[in-house]
Image (cartoon, helix red, strand yellow):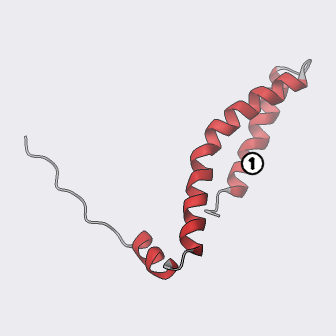
């Protein structure tokens, strides 16, 4: 939903290939190791995707999208 699917798929392929190359005698273990790291890596992306999907499907979607893309003022740096 947030444009990360292809990026994650390419990274998944590279990481899985590396894990299988590291442990070719035990592909089941290599896959489990890869999956554990993949789930940790993709969790924040999945959460962001779910939030964007909820925003897009809400009754206030138009206003929510405008707020999402409207820059917020930055806070001034604290004085020393």
**Secondary element type, mark 1:** helix
Outermost residue toward the right?
Answer: 25
Outermost residue toward the front?
Answer: 59
Q: Quadrant of residue 40?
A: top right
Q: Quick check: 34 above or below 48?
A: above
Q: Quick check: 3 above or below 23?
A: below
- In the rendered structure, the answer to whether residue 79 lies left or right of residue 20 reads left
Q: Position of residue 65 (x, y in %)?
A: 48, 75
Q: Position of residue 48 (x, y in %)?
A: 55, 55
Which quarter of the rendered picture does the N terminus lie within?
bottom right
Q: Quick check: 58 above or below 44?
A: below
- In the rendered structure, the answer to whether residue 14 lies left or right of residue 53 reads right
Q: Provide the residue designation for mark 1.
A: 10
**Residue visible at 75% across and 48% down in the picture:** 10
Q: Which class describes the residues within 10 Å of circle 1: few (<14), some (14-19), or many (20+)?
A: few
How many marks do you count on the picture? 1
**Residue visible at 63% across and 52% down in the picture:** 46
Q: Quadrant of residue 49?
A: bottom right
**Residue visible at 68% across and 32% down in the picture:** 37
Which quarter of the rendered picture does the C terminus lie within?
top left
Q: Nearer the viewer, residue 68 or 15?
A: 68
Q: Quick check: 39 above or below 10?
A: above
Q: Nearer the viewer, residue 69 or 80?
A: 69
Q: Position of residue 66 (x, y in %)?
A: 43, 77
């Amino acid at each position: 939903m947030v444009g990360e699917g292809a990026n994650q798929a390419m990274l998944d392929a590279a990481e899985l290939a590396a894990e299988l190359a590291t442990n070719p005698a035990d592909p089941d273990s290599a896959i489990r190791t890869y999956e554990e790291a993949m789930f940790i890596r993709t969790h924040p992306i999945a959460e962001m995707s779910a939030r964007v999907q909820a925003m897009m499907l809400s009754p206030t979607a138009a206003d929510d999208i405008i707020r999402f893309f409207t820059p917020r003022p930055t806070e001034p740096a604290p004085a020393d």
